[in-house]
Image: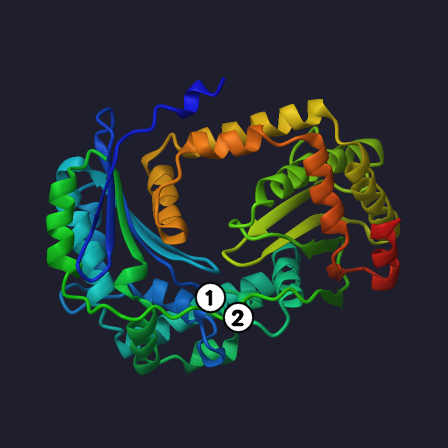
Amino acid sequence: MNHHFVREKRIDITQLANGLTIATERMPEIATATLGVWVGTGSRHEMAHEHGLSHMIEHMAFKGTTRRSARQIAEDIENVGGDINAATSVEYTSYTARVLGENIDVALDVLGDILINSAFDAAELTREKGVILQEYAAVEDTPDDLVYDAFMETAYAGQPIGRPILGTPDTIKSFDETTIRAFLAREYAPGKMVLAAAGNVDHRQVVETAERLFGAMPAVEIRQPESGLYSGGERRISRRLEQANIVLGLPGLSFKDPGYYATHLFAHILGGGLTSRLWHEVRENRGLAYSIDSFHWPFSDTGLFGIGAGTAGSDVAELMNVTLATMRQATQDISEIEMVRAKAQMKVALLTALETPGGRIERVARQLLSWGRVVPSDEIVLKVDALTPEQVRDAGQRLLQGAPTLAAIGPIKGLPSSARIDLGLRG
């Protein structure tokens, strides 16, 4: 019985006239308040000349406004014991803060200031370009990060959704205030922005402050990004390294697809933990890799399934053969006990995310942006619990019919050809 999932707290939701949505969840046992603004815009919303701009804007938000210097932004938050952060992903950008409940007005004012009044000073922009170029260089020097960028670029060749979030040195260097403000005017539409807060918060207070800070933002027509079309292919980068980093992928599903949960469970049973099939066969039985895992990355209109591992150059062929055989076998004989274990692990992950105000507001914001409503936890769990081993095996079989994507870096001379991998997926 899923009694853990029926005691949802009350979430109050208000929408301003310009379309911005405010959602709050009062948690009486919490003395702090965690709040943030989620914008339904990320790297996939960028045009070619804007590649990396979402990430740049996230950085520049803390570099000064017409009212505050960069130092003052930090001081105003930290003077009341708070912290502030931001993050950019493929489909979202978020700006978050945590303070004592009595100081929520301070956090809201700072968030409103950096989103509405950022100055984009030329000197600060130049300095921040240097910081991001260092971040870019760090990824280039980290094969187990770089391989995933290569993986996405190959799976969605020539498309915004496949481009690395950081951008390229050329695009990063090209950004100026005009480019930034044009992007903000086009993409930071109130209709795809959610202000979410949880903890020691009062809904009416948050709404009143949000109206003052964001109410004057003009309603902007929401522009849909270019659809993500999985292409597949391969990218091999030979380097003199101690280890080969390999990612093998297949077309997955959108989180809006009815088959999403079955695909998610297949990925978890295959390579989601210490009892998963890949971990047991590749790591424990054969010692071919320190770690190996499978994942399913869902987006609003597409998805990507993959398996990532690092191994010695002399073991790449065996690693791939064992991985392909394990994938094929999983589509034939996933058991009821594996299903029970995977479902339990998924419930724990869901509950864990809901145990902090930060986890709760992220869930609320993303669901409102994606679905226009907050999806109750028990609704999700009922869908997961209803899945049968046959449905999950079928999801795996559909995955294996897709064209593979292969990205590999390091000593990869022995890695099988894409044609052999494709044949191996089908047995």
- Tell me where residue 60 sits by quadrant: bottom left
Q: Position of residue 174 (x, y in %)?
A: 42, 82
Q: Which amino acid does label 2 sit on?
A: Pro
Considering depth in this image, is 388 or 22 the residue closer to the camera?
388
Can you tell which mark lies on residue 414?
Answer: none
Name the N-terminal-most of marks 1 and 2.
1
Expressed as whole percent of the image width and height from the top left, the position of residue 186 reads 32, 74
Q: How far apart are marks 1 and 2 (CA)?
A: 7 Å
Q: Is residue 352 visible?
A: no
* Tag 1 and tag 2, C-beta contact below 8 Å: yes
In the rendered structure, which amino acid carries the disc numbered 1? Answer: Ser
User: Left or right: 211 with respect to 322?
Assistant: left
Q: Could you say which is closer to the camera, residue 20 or residue 28?
A: 20
Position of residue 394 in the picture relative to residue 161 (left or right) = right
Residue 188 figure quarter: bottom left
Residue that appears at 37% across and 53% down: 369
Q: Residues within 10 Å of mark 1 (few under 14, many from 20)?
A: many
Q: Is residue 385 left or right of residue 209?
A: right
Above or below 181: residue 298: above
Classify 228 as above or below 351.
below
Which quadrant holds residue 187? bottom left
Q: What residue is rendered at 35% in x and 41% in y?
A: 374
Residue tagged 1:
43
Would you call the spot at circle 2 few (<14 residues within 10 Å), some (14-19), or many (20 or more)? many
For disc 2, the marked residue is 160
Q: Give the residue drawn at x 28%, y 49%.
A: 36
Element type at mark 1: helix
